[in-house]
Amino acid sequence: GSWYDADIDHVIITEEEIREKTAALAKQVASDYATVQDGLLLVCVLKGAVMFVADFARALGRHGPPVELEFMAVSSYGQGTTSSGVVRILKDLDRDIAGRHVVVVEDIVDSGLTLSWLLKYLESRAAASVEVVALFRKPDAIKVHVPVKYVGFDIPSEFVVGYGLDFSERYRELPYVGVLKPEVYARV
Ligand code: PRP
Ligand code: MN
Ligand code: MG
């Protein structure tokens, strides 16, 4: 087993479930954007979405349309474990997105504060359209409503890690999503 198995209370979403859901989401997005002429611009929100965007983009590659990848890094959490709502851009888009069809790729929507800010920002850059695909969502944690067109899994508001989701920058590389044992985050 993995080095981290002892820290995980239980798995809530398996590697296979993630793979199947990613394929289904890609199929849906591919058919919705089948007619766009200049392809899709995927905006990956670092760092959590990095695993998902890699798998999602490859799944889209089986069905088209062509995609381009852009990365943004924003910070909303500071030191704590709850979102402050104050978002700072750590890494901006490299290119102009005006007139492009943008799909924001997020690992998780928790309070919605990060995404709500990001959508306003991308719209202010004159994208032709902006939609969101989020692999996970915590419906009980929502503080601001954000229109997320494509959602993988609704999950309970527990402290989950894996497949991009971190605790103190660790556990992102787990291929599944699991609930962290409380004694792990009680250590700090
Ligand atoms: C996490 C997660 C989302 C965001 C969701 O990112 O990856 O981007 O929080 O939270 P919200 O809906 O309450 O805003 P985080 O800020 O921890 O950075 P990371 O992706 O680098 O882990
Ligand atoms: Mn993130
Ligand atoms: Mg994080």
Image (cartoon, rainbow, N blue to C red):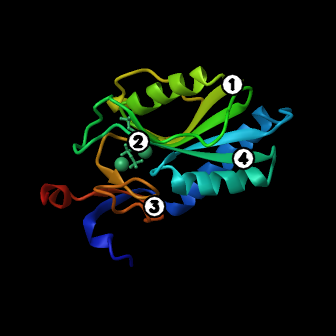
Nearer-the-camera pick, 13 or 145: 145
Q: Say the numbered circle drawn on residue 75.
A: none
Between label 4 and label 3, give the one nearer the viewer. 4
- Left or right position of 87 against 78: right
Q: Say the numbered circle drawn on residue 68.
A: 4
Residue at image mark 2: 155
Check disc 2 and give the amino acid type. Ile
Q: Give how far across and how far down residue 117 sits, in percent.
A: 45, 26
Mark 3 falls on what kind of element?
A: loop
Check disc 3 and give the amino acid type. Tyr
The quadrant in which the C terminus is found is bottom left
N-term-proximal mark, 3 vs 1: 1
Task: Measure the alpha-carbon separation of dots 3 and 1.
Answer: 31 Å
Nearer-the-camera pick, 16 or 53: 53
Is the CB–ligand 1 distance for label 3 below 8 Å? no
N-term-proximal mark, 2 vs 4: 4
Q: Give how far across and how far down residue 96 sits, in percent.
A: 67, 34
Task: Measure the alpha-carbon separation of dots 1 and 2.
Answer: 27 Å
Label 4 neighbour load within 10 Å: few <14, some 14-19, many 20+: few
Q: Can residue 28 be seen from the camera position used here?
A: no
